[in-house]
Amino acid sequence: MKIGVFDHLDKRAEPLGQFYEDRLAFTRSLDEAGFYSYHIAEHHATPLGMAPSPNVYLAAVARETKQLRFGPLVYLLPLYHPVRLIEEIAMIDNLSQGRLDMGVGRGISPYEVGSYDLDPVDTREMFAEGLDLLLKGLTSDRLDHQGKWYRVNDVPLELHPVQKPFPPLWYGAGNESGALVAARYGMHFVTLGDDGRCKNLIARYREMWEEAKDDPHRATAPAEPMIGVGRHLFLADTDAEAERLAAQAYKHWYDALAKLWRDHGANPVTGMMIENYADARRGGQCIIGTPETVRTELIAQIADVGYNYLVCQIAWGDLGHTREMRSLQLFVDEVMPAIAAL
């Protein structure tokens, strides 16, 4: 059982420079503790994400860590010119000596892609064409492409990733359509939501993985995918203290998630994000308490839902750096060994 971390880098009331310093200290601790990978979100025009340029932030992570894998979950492909992204991916994979995990997606918020003057209706086609072009460019010395959305005229590519043929592909899916994309391209898969929702989607993804085994995109796929579920975690010395602080922090986090939607008179469209803390707690999206409580709940949930990759969200909301580091240490010392042994 592998254990990773997901980070929205959601905004909090402190200077941004200090926020980045705290997060880099956090990633150093993940590296030292032996976590598998550190995944970050890409968001724009919203307090949900203070890393709108994942590659800028990840270049710093690359130099602060030694063995921790890391990457975006996900690059919003319609917002990039493929040639630029190919070059930057190759740079970061070399800076980290081959530790990049390459998550891709099209973006679920029409307001975020709209901030780049894109019509959300177009992004599905842009993603499909951009993904094929990205993978082609990462394995070529020259790139020539004349498509609907992108035109590349015999461009030489002087940078190549360390990992061959390219860094591992990841996909964050909230429905069967996304699971199908992940299965067809042989991508590792991450989802979230309540236990029942995750269990059903994972079962469907496993079926799709088998059904798509002969898809030509699967030539570079791993023999077995990593199937991850994202979970908000917070550990403290007592269950009561953990619940009190987590309930407040969860509201802060969800308000950041929903702000841009609410500004436009809408609500987030995905069922992956549970608005109410009590519902998130009952449904298994939040696992909160003492190390004993968290360990017991996680072991039971993993057995029931059937995932092989725990994706912890440890730094979130307004918990603050000190509390997050204490929570991380409790998890590493008293929970992580039991989960890793599953």
Image (cartoon, rainbow, N blue to C red):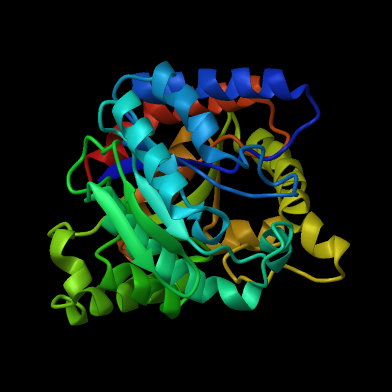
Q: Quadrant of residue 180?
A: bottom left
Instruction: Specify the farthest residue to the bottom.
Output: 211
Residue 79 in sight from this viewpoint: yes
Q: Quadrant of residue 305?
A: bottom left
Q: Residue at x 41, y 69 (%)?
A: 129
What count of labels does the image hold? 0
Going by the image, does 168 lie left or right of 103? left
Q: Does residue 55 sit above or below 47 in this rendering? A: above
Q: Position of residue 229 (x, y in %)?
A: 42, 56
Going by the image, does 219 lie left or right of 35? left
Q: Residue at x 26, y 38 (%)?
A: 161
Residue 174 in sight from this viewpoint: no
Q: Does residue 229 sit above or below 317 in this rendering? A: below
Q: Quadrant of residue 282?
A: bottom right
Toward the viewer: 260 or 144?
144
Going by the image, does 225 lie left or right of 237? left
Q: Residue at x 53, y 31 (%)?
A: 56
Q: Position of residue 141 (x, y in %)?
A: 22, 46
Q: Position of residue 133 (x, y in %)?
A: 35, 61
Q: Position of residue 25 (x, y in %)?
A: 52, 17
Toward the viewer: 9 or 185?
185
Q: Residue at x 22, y 69 (%)?
A: 217
Q: Does residue 173 sit above or below 122 in this rendering? A: above
